[in-house]
Image (spheres, grey):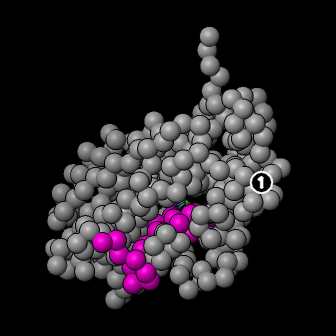
Amino acid sequence: MTMKKPLSSGGASPAVKNNLHPRSRHRGRYDFPALCAALPELNEFVRRNEWGDLSVDFADPRAVICLNRALLSQHYNVAHWQIPPGALCPPVPGRADYIHYLADLLAADGQNVIPRGPQVSVLDIGTGASCIYPLIGQAEYGWRFTGTETDPASVKAAAAIVSANPGLSTAIRLRTQPDPLHIFRGVIKKGERYTATLCNPPFHASEQQAGEGAQRKRRNLGLEDKPALNFGGTAGELWCEGGETGFITRMIKESAEFASQVNWFTSLVSRKENLKPLYQALRDVGAREVKTVEMAQGQKVSRFIAWTFLPAEKRK
Ligand code: SAH
């Protein structure tokens, strides 16, 4: 007998035992009664799945957005969160893991104590309409964020989230990157210092590939016969010149120009086979130290690379 695939996505399945970061708030199953208490509108989407567990239909964009809103409210003190139709709806547990592992990386620079508070300044490259990393990093560790974006609609949506939540405007600022082929140029200003940069890069190499990726996702969710209700991101969010390797290589090259302004540059790398050319690019620019941090979310393994040009005593 073949088992039907559970209705879940993005490594966020509440039914499987996950191996998220030890400090993750998402290691157990989703606590639907608590989530509904945090956000009563979630009640409309919660029902028992085929195993009798409370869940939502992960193939329904409205349900997934509502679940995210509840998670952000329950765990990260975000009272208002909305993304435009079709925008990339981030699986919260995976995004939180990057923040926690980044905190560990920064802790290694100071007697294994996680640096907290607004003196820690983080640059989020491509913050998206969801502003997801700044929201989590601010709530977990009190860090200050600068989010960059090329897409005007995403900047507008992220700005609306920040201004709708009292207290966030002092912690999160947004900057538009006018040139999609630039990463730090035009957004890091003279004299500014950042403790770290982070990035979930667009990973497809063309608009067509991004479209095919979305199609595959829909197929995996059993949605191919349903009208296109894309919530996995617009093509513009998902592709860039040269795909993931192109984007991160540009980032590595530009990072050398800002070597003394940033303690740690980091970026997710979705494909393991992309690591090799990136390590080469890092050697070419003379990075002083390079680390690869592996993260596991259920069956899915992802990783980020981190590099610095500064010696430890200058990373304080
Ligand atoms: N951080 C969000 C969105 C990631 S998608 C999340 O993790 O869910 C990648 C984002 O990068 C898109 O929103 C896209 O518009 C943006 N982007 C693409 N090129 C960029 C560049 N050169 N500088 C800044 N953002 C860029």
Can residue 117 be seen in this snapshot? yes
Q: Quadrant of the N terminus?
A: top right
Q: Quadrant of the C terminus?
A: bottom left
Say left or right for 135 vs 37: left
The crowding category of the residue bearing disc 1, from other C-alpha atoms within 10 Å (few below 14, some 14 to 19, many at least 20), is many
Front residue (pair 117, 207): 117
Can residue 177 be seen in this snapshot? no
Q: Quadrant of residue 305?
A: bottom left
Q: Amino acid at mark 1?
A: Leu
Horizontal and vertical percent for residue 117? 43, 81
> Residue drawn at (61%, 14%), measured in percent from left and top?
2
Q: Quadrant of residue 262?
A: bottom left
Image height of 251 relative to 26, above or below:
below
Based on the picture, tell me whether residue 58 belongs to the magenta stretch. no
The residue pinned by badge 1 equals 42
Based on the picture, tell me whether residue 115 belongs to the magenta stretch. yes
Q: Which residues are magenta?
A: 113-136
> Residue drawn at (20%, 80%), measured in percent from left and top?
314
Horizontal and vertical percent for residue 183? 42, 67
Image height of 218 relative to 254, above or below:
above
